[in-house]
Image (spheres, helix red, strand yellow):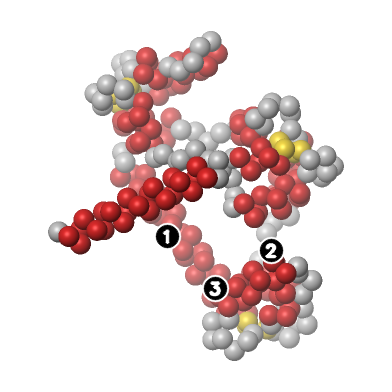
């Protein structure tokens, strides 16, 4: 019993730590659909009515009213938890909707500051992504630049594992050394490459073969698939 209490306490501390970290980064704590439903269900009767869902005035209230009608699948004037969690009620946002959401000041461009506010990629990747997209270097990403970047990615697919290994193997001898990975990198990037090299060099012989590189990629793919599978199961369990 004592072990169970300690385990529950540890889980609670982790959850609080995650929320605190999000608040420190200026992000709103992320809630599951079930938590959203419970928060909106003011009277706790297990269903949502229009008054519970409506927020704001004017256009905002109208938008919530329209959303309510769409989510009320059987048209009985109430939204059950099953209806609320139905995937049809949570379609993926369009490119225009995603752009508008990130363009906080609605000036027709996404600044670096606006990009960092959203829950997108890891912090260290945001600047790289921003620089690649902001082609005219005016400090903002326009819809046209985002569309151009998207088109470029579609027309230039990601390199294969063999191609990526070939890019790292500068001297073409069939193996990659730490020096090859660190070449041309600044101090911070070089340190990251050292950590990356340790993961790839499975037998710790000071060089990475194509087989080791392929094996690591397989493991990474398996881990991603496993995470995606868990997320899918969690979604089904909530229905």
Q: Which residue is mark 1?
A: 226
Q: Is residue 84 above or below residue 181?
A: above
Residue for point 52% across, 17% down:
60
Calculate the distance from the C-alpha at mark 1 to the C-alpha at mark 2: 23 Å
Query: According to the image, label 2 marks what residue?
Result: 159
In the rendered image, the quadrant that contains the N terminus is: bottom left
Q: Residues within 10 Å of mark 2 (few under 14, many from 20)?
A: few
- Percent x, y for residue 142? 75, 35
In terms of depth relative to the viewer, which is nearer, 201 or 73? 201
Expressed as whole percent of the image width and height from the top left, the position of residue 145 reads 77, 40
Q: Which residue appears farthest toward the bottom when viewing the image?
A: 205
- CA distance separating discs 3 and 1: 15 Å
Residue 2, how many percent across, how many down?
17, 60
Helix or strand or loop: what does disc 3 sit on? helix
Kindly identify the residue that appears in the image at 41 percent across and 39 percent down.
31
Q: Residue at position x 68%, y 27% from top?
A: 105
Separation of marks 3 and 2 at Cα, in angstroms: 16 Å
Q: Which residue is pictured at 50% across the width and 42% down the height?
A: 23
Horizontal side of residue 61 vs 112, given as left or right: left
Which residue matches tag 3?
216
- Compared with 90, 62 (above or below) is above
Residue 239: which quarter of the image?
A: top left
Please tell me which of labels 1 and 2 falls first in the chain.
2
Q: Nearer the viewer, residue 188 or 54?
A: 188
Q: Nearer the viewer, mark 1 or mark 2?
A: 1
């Amino acid at each position: 019993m004592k072990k169970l209490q300690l385990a529950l306490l540890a889980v609670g501390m982790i959850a609080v730590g995650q929320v605190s970290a999000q608040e420190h980064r200026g992000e709103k704590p992320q809630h599951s659909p079930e938590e959203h439903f419970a928060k909106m269900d003011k009277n706790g009767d297990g269903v949502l009515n229009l008054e519970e869902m409506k927020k704001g005035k004017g256009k905002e209230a109208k938008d919530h009213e329209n959303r309510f009608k769409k989510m009320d699948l059987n048209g009985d004037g109430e939204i059950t938890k099953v209806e609320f969690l139905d995937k049809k009620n949570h379609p993926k946002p369009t490119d225009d909707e995603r752009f508008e959401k990130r363009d906080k000041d609605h000036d027709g461009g996404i600044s670096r500051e606006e990009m960092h506010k959203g829950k997108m990629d890891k912090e260290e990747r945001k600047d790289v992504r921003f620089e690649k997209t902001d082609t005219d270097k005016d400090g903002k990403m326009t819809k046209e630049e985002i569309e151009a970047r998207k088109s470029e990615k579609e027309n230039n697919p990601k390199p294969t594992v063999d191609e990526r290994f070939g890019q790292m193997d500068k001297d073409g001898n069939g193996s990659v050394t730490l020096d090859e990975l660190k070449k041309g990198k600044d101090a911070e990037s070089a340190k990251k490459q050292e950590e990356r090299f340790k993961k790839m060099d499975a037998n710790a012989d000071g060089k990475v073969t194509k087989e080791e590189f392929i094996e690591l990629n397989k493991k990474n793919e398996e881990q991603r698939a496993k995470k995606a599978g868990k997320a899918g199961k969690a979604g089904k369990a909530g229905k």
